[in-house]
Amino acid sequence: MAAVAAFYPKFQQLGIKVLAISTDSVYSHKVFSEVSPSMRNVRYPLVSDRNQQISRAYRVLDESQGAAKRATVVIDPEGIIVSKIVYPKDVGRGLPELIRLLEALQFHRSTGLGAPANWTPGMPGIRRDIANAGSI
């Protein structure tokens, strides 16, 4: 969560709402936020999914562990999941790539153009056209 907290101002700048959801109890969240130095910078809601309904609904529940996998789910303003990334337990998130993904999704929403591979803000977009398939 500390890494996400470091990027939180950028999420806010993009108008992105951030929630941290875990299968831990609200009491565990409270203790964690009081004891962990990294939690002092967290300015977004921590949601307890103690009954595992959210984790199960998003298909990120590790049934054998009874806990959610580390995942990032991006939901558009219409409530549609447009991206879901599930990370191996030994690998953290790549926040710069997540920011790029969010910027590319916003670029598409505002222009109707796609964001090609390695697109970054300021680069041109492409029109979805089968004739362009495979072109660089």
Image (spheres, rainbow, N blue to C red):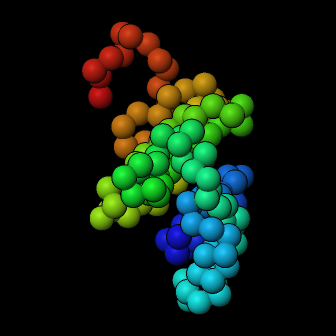
Pinpoint residue 22: horizontal percent, then vertical percent.
56, 61
Instruction: Identify the residue at image location x=69%, y=54%.
Output: 17
Total numbered labels placed on residues in the image: 0
Quarter of the picture containing the C terminus is top left
Task: Say above or below: 69 vs 37.
Answer: above
Answer with left or right where residue 136 lies relative to residue 15. Answer: left
Task: Say above or below: 130 vs 125.
Answer: above
Residue 101 visible to an observer of this rendering: no
Residue 126 visible to an observer of this rendering: yes
Pinpoint residue 23: horizontal percent, then vertical percent.
56, 60
Foreground residue among 69 and 95: 69
Answer with left or right where residue 17 lies relative to residue 23. Answer: right
Pinpoint residue 8: horizontal percent, then vertical percent.
62, 66
Instruction: Identify the residue at image location x=65%, y=61%.
Output: 48
Answer with left or right where residue 31 lies relative to residue 126. Answer: right
Task: Say above or below: 15 vs 1.
Answer: above
Foreground residue among 100 and 40: 40
Instruction: Identify the residue at image location x=50%, y=28%.
Output: 114
Task: Say above or below: 26 vs 55.
Answer: below
Pinpoint residue 65: horizontal percent, then vertical percent.
39, 58
Instruction: Identify the residue at image location x=47%, y=18%.
Output: 128
